[in-house]
Amino acid sequence: MIRFNSDYCEGAHPRILERLVETNLVQTAGYGEDEFCTNAAKLIREACKAPSADVHFLVGGTQTNLIAISCALRSHQGVLSAVTGHINTHETGSIEATGHKVLTLPHIDGKLSASDISRYVSAHRSDVTREHTVMPKMVYISNSTELGAVYTKRELAEISHICHENGLYLFMDGARLGYALMADDSDLELSDIAALCDIFYIGGTKVGALFGEALVITNNELKPDFRYIMKQRGAMLAKGRLLGLHFEAL
C-alpha cells in the first residue's frame, strides 16, 4: 500500500541515514550542545536571514507546540487558533493540560484572518468584565493548514501587524512548512516568516527526517530560559546531536 499522508509514513531520506552512519562513532557533548546542532542552527539562521534568532531542536510537533505556547503565556492567558487548528483538534488537549485555553476562531480552509483576530481582541478589551475571561496573548497559525491551504505573504503580514499592534505573539506551526513553501501558489520565503512571526518552527518529521522540528525564536522576550523549559518538559534529548544531524542533511 502507498500512503499519501506525509513522509512520516516511511523512514528517512537516504542522506540522513548516511550521515548517521558516517558520524556514529564521533564523540560529542550531549543535550544539543554539539557541533552538529551548532552548525545546523547556523544554517537555519542563514536561510531565515535572522542572524540573532535562537534555534532549538525538538523531537515532534505536539511537543514543540506545547512548549512554545506554554513558555510564552502567563497563567491567565490563552492562544487564538482556527477551530481546525492542530492544537485544538488533534493533540489530546495538550495546551489545556498546561493550564492555557485554546480560544477558537472561524476560518477559511484552516486559515485565520487579521480581521477576525482584531474583532476578538477588541471584544475582549471592551468587555467591562474581561478579568473574568481568558486574555488572548498569542495567535497560532498552521502553514500549510490542516486542510491544505497556504498563507500568502500579504495575509501573514496583515496578521503580524494586528498581533504586534495589540501586543500578541504570532506563532506559526511549521510541521508542514516544507509543503507550504514549495506550493505552486506560495509567495513566502523563510526570511518573510522569520521577519513576521515571533516564533515558528521548521518541520523535519514530515519532510524526510526520522524525527525532529527546528524551533526558531526571533522575539527577544521569548528567548530567556527556554532550555530550562525544554528540560522541565522532557524535551531536551540527551543525544541531541541526532537532531542536528538531521537538519544539517536536510
Image (tube, rainbow, N blue to C red):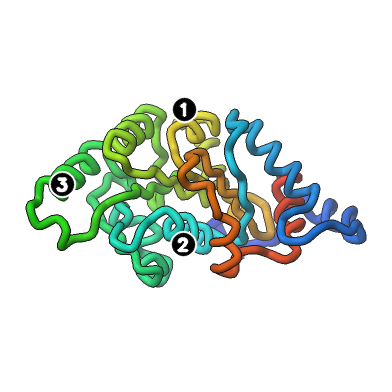
Q: Secondary structure at mark 2?
A: helix
Residue 2 seen in render = no
Q: Which of the two labelled residues, at mark 2 and mark 3, occupies the earlier sequence position?
A: 2
Image-based side of 98 in relation to 112, left or right:
right
Residue 84 seen in render = yes
Report how many numbered discs are placed on residues in the image. Answer: 3
The picture quadrant where one finds residue 46 is top right
User: Which residue lies under the disc numbered 2?
Assistant: 66
The picture quadrant where one finds residue 153 is top left
Q: Which of the two labelled residues, at mark 1 and mark 3, occupies the earlier sequence position?
A: 3
Q: Secondary structure at mark 1?
A: loop
Label 2 to label 3: alpha-carbon separation = 26 Å
Closest to the camera, between mark 1 and mark 3, is 3
Q: Amino acid at mark 2?
A: Leu
Q: Secondary structure at mark 3?
A: helix
Closest to the camera, between mark 2 and mark 3, is 3
- Crowdedness of circle 2 by 10 Å Cα count: few (<14), some, many (20+)? many
User: Which residue lies under the disc numbered 3?
Assistant: 125
Q: Residue 92: x and y, percent?
A: 40, 72
Q: Residue 115: x and y, percent?
A: 21, 37
- Crowdedness of circle 1 by 10 Å Cα count: few (<14), some, many (20+)? some
Q: Amino acid at mark 3?
A: Arg
